[in-house]
């Protein structure tokens, strides 16, 4: 099985999101956080999170990038409950039962996104609100290189002889 994990290439997420996700934590789209919000309610760092942030679990922080990783069924089952408890305790979900339903749907969506993708495929997300007030998500994938290294050798390291 596969699921998304947070990946960071630099520290920019600490500056663009109100809360940055932690590297290597599991990740979902997190679009459910914005359900029912209008364009005029999404401002500042919340707009950045809406526009291109994956949601980290359990931090509920955001990340610009997520990568495909393997997950066991036991880990996924534990993640359902961890995410649900976090939604109740940190995000104010009305009940564990409702939060579990959201957690399962978000994790299932992320797993479907990863299905058939190579491990280490990197994803970005773009969300927009259309003229009808509905939001759409678009995912872009950056596939890992295959075969030969994607760079040129510019030097060799060798032992020095007695003359230097």
Image (cartoon, rainbow, N blue to C red):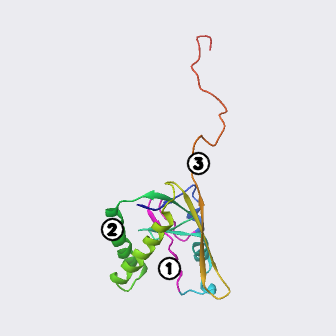
Q: Residues within 10 Å of mark 1 (few under 14, many from 20)?
A: few
Q: How many dots with numbers?
A: 3
Quadrant in which the C terminus appears: top right
Q: Residues within 10 Å of mark 3 (few under 14, many from 20)?
A: few
Discs 3/1, front: 3
Q: Residue at x 51, y 67 (%)?
A: 113
> Which segment is the magenta one?
17-35
On whether residue 21 falls in the magenta region, the answer is yes
User: Which quadrant would residue 128 be assigned to in this image?
Assistant: bottom right
User: Which quadrant would residue 132 be assigned to in this image?
Assistant: bottom right
Find out whether the residues at labels 3 and 1 contact each other: C-beta distance under 8 Å: no
Nearest the viewer among 151 and 146 is 146
The main secondary structure of the magenta stretch is loop
Residue underneath mark 3: 145
Residue underneath mark 1: 33
Instruction: Assign a secondary structure to mark 1.
Output: helix
Q: Residue at x 49, y 59 (%)?
A: 68
Distance of label 3 from label 2 (alpha carbons): 31 Å
Residue underneath mark 2: 77
Nearest the viewer among 38 and 153 is 153
Distance of label 3 from label 1 (alpha carbons): 33 Å
Instruction: Assign a secondary structure to mark 2.
Output: helix
Residue 110, compared with residue 117, is above or below; it is: below
Q: x, y percentage for residue 101?
A: 38, 80
Sequence-wise, the earlier of marks 3 and 1 is: 1
Find out whether the residues at labels 3 and 2 contact each other: C-beta distance under 8 Å: no
Q: Residue at x 56, y 69 (%)?
A: 53
Quadrant in which the N terminus appears: bottom left
Q: x, y percentage for residue 98?
A: 37, 83
Q: x, y percentage for residue 95?
A: 35, 84
Taking the image as shown, residue 58 lies to the left or right of residue 161, namely left
């Amino acid at each position: 099985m596969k699921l998304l994990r947070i990946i960071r290439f630099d520290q920019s997420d600490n500056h663009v999101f109100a809360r940055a996700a932690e590297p290597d934590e599991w990740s979902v789209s997190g679009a459910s956080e914005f359900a029912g919000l209008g364009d005029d309610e999404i401002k500042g760092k919340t707009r950045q999170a809406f526009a291109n942030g994956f949601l980290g679990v359990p931090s509920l922080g955001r990340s610009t990038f997520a990568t495909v990783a393997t997950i066991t069924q036991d880990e996924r089952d534990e993640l359902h409950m961890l995410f649900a408890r976090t939604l109740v305790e940190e995000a104010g979900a009305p009940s564990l039962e409702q939060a579990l339903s959201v957690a399962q749907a978000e994790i299932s969506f992320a797993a479907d996104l990863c299905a058939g993708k190579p491990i280490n495929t990197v994803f970005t997300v773009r969300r927009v609100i259309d003229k009808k007030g509905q939001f759409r998500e678009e995912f872009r994938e950056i596939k890992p290189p295959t075969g030969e290294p994607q760079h040129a050798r510019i030097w060799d390291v060798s032992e020095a002889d007695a003359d230097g």
